[in-house]
Amino acid sequence: DAGVIQSPRHEVTEMGQEVTLRCKPISGHNSLFWYRQTMMRGLELLIYFNNNVPIDDSGMPEDRFSAKMPNASFSTLKIQPSEPRDSAVYFCASIDSLASEAFFGQGTRLTVV
Amino acid sequence: SQQGEEDPQALSIQEGENATMNCSYKTSINNLQWYRQNSGRGLVHLILIRSNEREKHSGRLRVTLDTSKKSSSLLITASRAADTASYFCATDGGSNYKLTFGKGTLLTVNP
């Protein structure tokens, strides 16, 4: 397996634009996590899914953020409208069962100017 | 807020020395995990210790867990320059399996 695949790797966008980040988890993994990493706040859990169902989205900063998992092999994190403070590295991770190790993608570095 | 908190925030040692990093957490857990992150890369799993375990080894890594103190430590023995990275502990939140991370310890191993 190629591991967790995220796209794009880098995204530069203007304030106010919509941004969509994509993640393909490892095949067979049941849980998927979205994280945001910044120097100031570290690695924050935004939302996680189990069997494609959102379980906890309490980490989503505000209504501008939304995440979907339409099937077991694909998830998106959307920011609309984007703001400069959204600039961060966004990671997706998947787990084959709860209470086991997580596999991370390489991340998407988002810059909002 | 982060579930786990590592200390120290940064650690600088010489090659060959041992490095110890600590993690404290707040709620019950099923397991605690340690991850490593090289600059600009994703996190890589190192080791998992279950709540009913007290110590675990993997190569040059030794992890301890004290559930009564809600703390864990990661020891890297005979460090190498290639061990330079950030190290994070992660907890699963007990019943809800919510995997959350601390802010990490930046380890620098000088050759």
Image (cartoon, coloured by chain):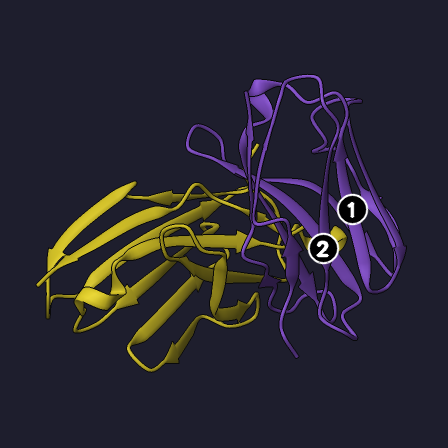
Chain colours: A purple, B yellow
Per the image, the residue denoted by label 2 is: A23
The answer for which chain carries disc 2 is A
Quadrant where the N terminus of chain B lies?
top right
Which label number is shown at residue B80?
A: none
- Position of B57 with respect to B91 (left or right) is left
| Point 33% across, 72% down: residue | B62
- Quarter of the rendering containing residue A51: bottom right
Q: Nearer the viewer, residue B32 or B26?
A: B32
Residue A26 placed where, x, y %? 71, 70
Amino acid type, callout 2? Cys
Q: Earlier in the sequence, mark 1 or mark 2?
A: 2
Q: Nearer the viewer, residue B104 or A38?
A: A38
Say whether marks 1 and 2 touch (CB < 8 Å): yes
Amino acid type, callout 1? Thr
- Quarter of the rendering containing residue B110: bottom left
Per the image, the residue denoted by label 1 is: A76
- Position of B73 with respect to A63 (left or right) is left
Residue B98 placed where, x, y %? 69, 50
Residue B93 placed where, x, y %? 66, 50
